[in-house]
Amino acid sequence: MLWNIASTFIALVKVTSARVPQPFHQSFASIDSQEIIFELHNNTVYLSNVQHPKAVYYGSWGPSERPLWIPLTAVSVNTSKVTEDDIKRTIQDYIDQDDVFNLAFLEAVLLQTATEGVIEKQAIDYLRSLNVSTIFVPPKVTIPSGASIGTVNIVPESQNQHVEGPFVAALKENAFYLYPVWRLYSDLYSVFLQGSYDPGDGSGIYRAVGAQNTKFFEQPLIPVPSRIYSWRDPRPLAGARVGVKDLFDVKGLQTTGGSKAWTHITPFANVTAPAIQRIIDLGGHIVGKQKLAQFASAADPWLWQDEHYPFNPRGDGWLTCSASSSGGGCSIAAYEWLDFAIGTDTGSSMRLPAAVSGVYGQRPSQGMMSLDLALPVSHPSDTTGVFARDPKKWAHFSKAWYTTTMQQNSTLTGLPAYDVPNTNQFPKRLVYLSEFSPQNQAATEPIWQSFISNLTQLFNMTTETINFTAVAQSAPEPAVPIMLEDKTMNTIWTWDQWRIIGKPLINAWTRLSDGRFPPLDPTHRDQWQRFLTDPVKEEDFQEALESRAKAVTWFEESVLFSTNESCSESLLVYDIGPGGFPSYREDVLNKLPNTTYVYKKADDAAILGASICPIFGCADYTIPIGEVPYKSAVTLKTEMMPVSMNLVVKRGCDFVLFNMIERLADAGLLRTVKAGRTLF
């Protein structure tokens, strides 16, 4: 879409009682009749939707041929006598706690005080020192006589919401409209497909920013709202900025699934997926849709074709983001301005991206959250989780988001229902899975041993080491070793997606393009072309589900089980990878010495460690616990890469594990990681 650039230079309008502030002297990029994009201070770019004001006030000023657009800050001071210190403290809070606000929004100030407030002269003088030209004040607010600042008396509309923070103000005739602003960040690490925001019209329809046409997969700008807007919002996720994996429907946006072919046969979403709507209802802001391996596959970086693969900011900037939820994991590692990202995990797609990007991320218990209106891989194995940098905020978000009323039905998961207690009935044993150890033990062992020692001491746990493969292969239940065979889980992982996405896409594309097969990335092209003549059979799928249900029963009786004292008697720990060796986004680099692939199975293991919970339904959380040096094949410098650990508890014990994580954070054993090259 072409943007018409128009410079707006509007003359000042003189009014009897006040000087209306100087309007913008910036260039406006007019996307359409609803939005303006402008720059303020150090080339910071903003967007404002000028169709849906947050508040309206009435006053009297001279006529103008067109609206006056003014950058304005709404200041709220809860006192009847406003002092210089009150103003200083309030503005400093805005600067310290909000990346959207900057001093350029102090061109004009809407000053809200307690009823019949008085603004001291020193406060007015301080505002003048900040180059505030005009203040707008409600009735019965007293301004000192002779104040050296323009003053406009305004009357609020009765239905106004409370406003505070940076706004664009429009003076039209005798009305004064305040429109929220969003700061536009460039997606420098290529982790988003499109930016989005709710324009505030009450419809719940999100608007895409910049790249309106998802068929071209352009690099977007990401809009984030002012954090000040949510300060008085009591909801548990108020103000949270959230990226969403682009297989969830968001009303008004197109769900691409990472496939250009899919966008050509599917409409824009007219309903938001329940899991995402819950975040919105709890106060979160969906700031964009994020990249994924096509249709949430496990495709390696060099197999991506429709999308440009995301960049991992850690280390040399050339490490893998893993697959599927790669955009979400690396986005949290990349951007301090982004709080959370929502991904999905079928085989490892939350946990491996979290591990390689050095952030927190989980595969919850099977069935913890509805996945309605999300493109499926496998109903019995799909889950959804949260990426975060701060362990306590991660726990807070997750415990607010997950709710028993939104659990999946057993007919989808193939597993019995369960309760989710929120207690401190912690595990009594730590069980280390020996065949899933970090590959580079020389570098990682000190970090691992220190963390395990501190963890077991904090929770008074005993320790044990087992070879999980040996335990499972010797299980008395015959279904257990069957579940360790690749064929069984591959059947479970392909049936739903083939019938819900693959066949409909191929049939539609064939009709539209003279019998041609659709253009797809190699992973799905190879699989679905094979399925044309040899598809997975429903009876094989049902048989695999029956085996899985029996295997889960064995697992929850023999490996992870509940007692009167513990929701999950044991805590399993293992390394999901890459285990202290770098794994690169470029295939040839992973063939060098002291490198690895993320999907590397140990010689004494029947499955990947990441496959335990997709098979047995348990909860598996990735936590960053340190970082180690490596010699980069790209920068030729010694860089740092994340070291992670995975914690596994019985199905349904998610909140107990989050309570453990909060304790670990309080004890200083888990820390907030920063965005950028290193974790700490």
Image (spheres, helix red, strand yellow):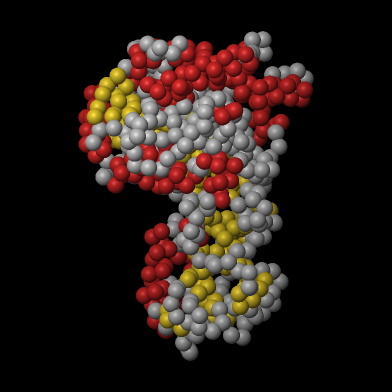
Q: Nearer the viewer, residue 363 or 111?
A: 363
> Which residue is at 44% across, 56% downward?
99
The answer to whether residue 111 is above or below residue 414 is below
The answer to whether residue 377 is above or below residue 203 is above
> Which residue is at 55% across, 59% downward?
181
> Which residue is at 56% across, 46% downward?
278
Q: Nearer the viewer, residue 133 or 622?
A: 622
Q: Is residue 480 left or right of residue 635?
A: right
Q: Residue furthest bottom?
A: 145
Q: Nearer the viewer, residue 360 or 596?
A: 360
Q: Quadrant of residue 511?
A: top right
Q: Is residue 661 left or right of residue 36?
A: left
The answer to whether residue 7 is above or below residue 417 is below
Residue 531 percent across, percent down from the top left: 64, 14
On the question of residue 257 being in view, the answer is no
> Which residue is at 50% across, 80% downward?
115
Q: Is residue 648 left or right of residue 175?
A: left
On the question of residue 275 being in view, the answer is yes
Residue 327 percent across, percent down from the top left: 49, 35
Residue 15 percent across, percent down from the top left: 62, 82
Tag count in the figure? Answer: 0
Q: Quadrant of the N terminus?
A: top right
Q: Quadrant of the C terminus?
A: top left
Q: Quadrant of residue 626?
A: top left
Residue 421 percent across, percent down from the top left: 42, 40
Q: Residue furthest front?
A: 564
